[in-house]
Image (cartoon, rainbow, N blue to C red):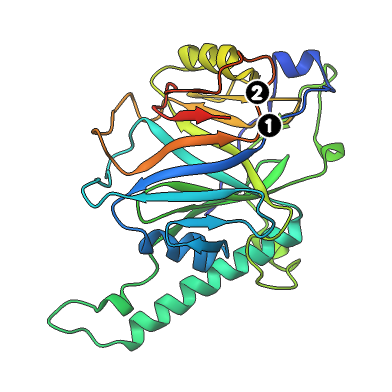
Amino acid sequence: MQARKRDFMYMSDDLSRSKASSVVAPLFRRLEYRTPAYEPLAALYRDALGLTEVEPGLLRSADAGFELAFDVRPESTRETETTVGLYHVAFLLPSRAALAATLRRVFAAVRSATERRAETPEAGGASSSAASGPAFFIEGAADHLVSEAVYLRDADGNGVELYADRDPSEWRRDAEGNIAMDTVELDMAGLLATASSTEGICAGSSIGHLHFHVPDLDTAEAFYRNNLGLKVTQRSYPGARFLAWGGYHHHLGVNTWAKDRQAPEGAAGLVRVLLSEPPPGTPSHNGLASDPAGIGWSW
C-alpha cells in the first residue's frame, strides 16, 4: 500500500523545549482484552507473530517483557464500525532486521492459509474452517522517517502495528529540536532483504506505543497530562495528537476519527493497560478506572 506524501510535521510543545529528558518512561507490561473467541486471535498473536502461549488466553513475549491476556466472553460483540477505544497497539522490534524477520513470518502465515484455502474443496457451498484463510489481514505500510511500520488487523478488529525505530541520531530536527515525522512509501523490498530468519517477535521487543480513538483531543490531552504525566510531542497532524514520556516520538497517540461513536457495553476490544511502574509525576494511587477511550490503567 502506498502512503500519501505530506509535508514534514515537526513534533512540538514540551519536547521542543527539552531535547533530552531524564524522565524514565514506564513500560507497557500487560494488555487485557475482551473477546468472543480466543483461537481466531491466537492465529495472529501466537502463530503469525510468534508470542509464547503460557496458557490458552495468555500470551507472552520471548523474554517476558510484556504479555497479552484475552478474557473470553462469548456474548461480546465485534463492532463493524470504528468506535471510541483502541486504534492500534504497536509492537516495537529492536532492529530493522528483527522487524523484517517478523514480517516474513506473517507473510508466510498468510501464504500458508491461502494455499490451504485453494487446496480444500468447498462443501455445501461454504469453505471448511481449515480453508477459511487467516483470521487477520494486512492493512498497509509506511515510512514515518523516525520509524518503519506495517499495519495489521486481528479477527476482532483490533489494530496492530509492527515497527522498528531508526536511530534517534537519524531523526530530522529543526533549529528548536523538533522532530520531523511524515507518512511516505515504505521500501518493503529493502526492508525484507535484511531478514535472516522468520523468528517472529523476538527478545528485546516491547509494546512501543498505543493509539486510541477518543471523543475530543483537548479533553484527552488534559486527561493524559494530568493523570499519566504524558507531554504533547505533535499536535499538527489532522484529527490526531501524540504524547510521550522522556523525549520519545510518542508513547500514546489519540485521534477523533471514530467521530465519538461508542461501542456497546461488553464489546470486544482492549479493556485495560498495565504499566511497569507509576507514570512520572502522577498521583500515588495505583491506577485509573477509565480514560477518554474507555480503557482502564493500572501500575
Describe residue 148's horizontal placement relative to residue 127 as left or right. Answer: right
The residue located at (63%, 65%) in the rendering is: 200
The numbered dot on residue 116 is none
Looking at numbered disc 2 in the image, what kind of residue is underneath it?
Pro
The residue located at (75%, 52%) in the rendering is: 94
Q: Which is more toward the observer, 30 or 150?
A: 30
Q: Is residue 122 above or below residue 265?
A: below
Q: Residues within 10 Å of mark 1 (few under 14, many from 20)?
A: some
Q: Which is more toward the observer, 281 or 140?
A: 281
Q: Using the rendered view, name the quadrant where residue 24 is placed.
A: top right
Residue 93 placement (x, y as % from top left): 69, 53
Residues at circles 2 and 1 in contact by the CB criterion of under 8 Å: yes
Q: Is residue 42 something one can see in this rendering? A: yes
Number of on-image labels: 2
The residue located at (21%, 84%) in the rendering is: 122
Residue 99 placement (x, y as % from top left): 68, 58
Residue 28 placement (x, y as % from top left): 61, 38
The residue beneath circle 1 is: 26
Describe residue 222's horizontal placement relative to residue 121 as left or right. Answer: right
Q: Residues within 10 Å of mark 2 (few under 14, many from 20)?
A: many
Q: Using the rendered view, name the quadrant where residue 276 is placed.
A: top right
The numbered dot on residue 279 is 2
Describe residue 280's horizontal placement relative to residue 176 as left or right. Answer: left
The residue located at (36%, 72%) in the rendering is: 133
